[in-house]
Amino acid sequence: MRVSWLVWLERRSPGLIRRWLDLSPDGCVARACVTASSAAPSLLALRRKLFAIFRSIQVTAALALGGCSGAPLPSDLERAQRLEAQHDEEAALAAYTAIRAACPRPDARPHNDCGLAATREAQVLERLGRTEAAVAAWEALPARTLDRRQAARGLARAAELLLDPLRRPERAAQLGWSCIERYPEEAPADDALAIAIRALRTPDLQGLRQHLDLLAKRFAREDIGDNLLLAAAEIAEELGDLAGAVARLDRLAQEFPRSSLRDNAIWRAGAILRPHDPEGALKRLFELLSTRREAVIVGSYHPLLLDDAALLVGQIWLDDLHDPSHAIHALTELATTYTDSPLRDDALLELARAHLAAHTPATESDRTAACAVLAHLLHDFPNGNRARTAAERRTALHCP
């Protein structure tokens, strides 16, 4: 990438490169980093280099726009960064606090530097073990930053600290819901949802499910909607409302076809339905398996669920619907088509069982087919988890 192009980009959209890189002055990714020391040294060094490049682009752009009278670098932030790198936490905290306190509004300084200082202040407080003060700083972040994701992260982190180590589940849940309601499109809302559920799971499952249903309806068009539906389905299943769980999982799959949770939702619905509605389970598993071509071409969020689904289809045909013929077809496809699957030996073992169930009692042809499948399993997976069982079954069948 040419530096001149980057200069043009910074000139056209000030702060855009910083948002892309999402870097703080110590090279730490804002969403993932709590302490600078938690990053691997090589990765941290790379991030610092990237930030240095970004700063040089800012200077070059400023000079290009205003000659030698370009805006100076924020020396107070650089000083705070330097103190932090030297592990002088108290001095760094004082520096970040002074910068943040001098910001009457989040936009008082360019490039969201006020929000950056407020974030670093909360992080340093946390590292110093001042958890109460850190919670207050994180909770105040939405009023101190221009970045919505940064604001959402502040509420989620405050909720997390309130839950553990401060053991205040009610307040943690309040902040978790607040994060979801104010920033439903931001990734930290997913974390806030998990925290709120952990905080409220024990006291009132019914009330928790009702609240999740209300939020799922309210944010049906937001990114958080699929997470809310999945959480409500899990609570419904825990309460014994299996029909309600399946309904929510089906809704997730239908309303969020590109969700990373879609495959899990379909799989779980099939597993719930299997004991009392095997046909309904098959319908959903076939829907999941129909995505295999797309998964091969463009990738799948959960490719392993495809072979799990194929194996479960074979087992449902064999054990629940007592249809060995369809079971043989499904298990043969898994064993021969999913060449990279770790379940191929499981499929072969079940395939041998399906051959033996083709007739009652099993014919000599059935036993021959089963022996051939077991021999195939032992040849391809001599050290696999199913090798011992396959050998025992060959012995019991008196296979040659």
Image (spheres, rainbow, N blue to C red):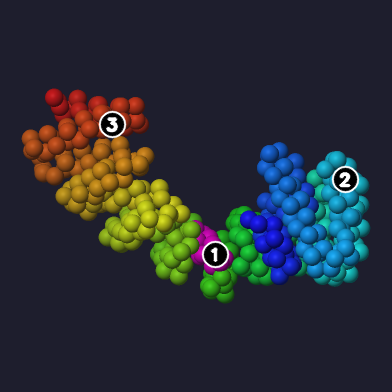
Mark 3 — residue?
A: 380
Measure the alpha-carbon separation of dots 2 and 1. Answer: 42 Å
Above-or-below relation of 147 to 158:
below
Above-or-below relation of 312 to 255:
above
Q: Does the segment drawn in magenta span residue 349?
A: no
Q: Amino acid at mark 1?
A: Leu
**Foreground pick, 375 / 238:** 375
- Taking the spot 67% from the left edge, 51% from the top edge, the residue there is 32
Q: Badge 3: few (under 14), some or many (20 or more) residues near its Cα, within 10 Å?
A: few
**Foreground pick, 324 / 236:** 324
Mark nearer the N terminus (2 vs 1): 2
Instruction: Say if residue 278 shows up in the picture.
Output: yes
Q: Amino acid at mark 2?
A: Leu
Q: Are marks 3 and 2 in contact (CB under 8 Å)?
A: no
From the viewer's perspective, is the residue at label 1 or at label 3 nearer? 3
Mark 1 — residue?
A: 228
Mark nearer the N terminus (3 vs 2): 2
Horizontal and vertical percent for residue 317?
23, 51
Tell me: 39 left or right of 125. Answer: left
Horizontal and vertical percent for residue 14?
74, 67
Q: What residue range appears in magenta?
A: 223-235
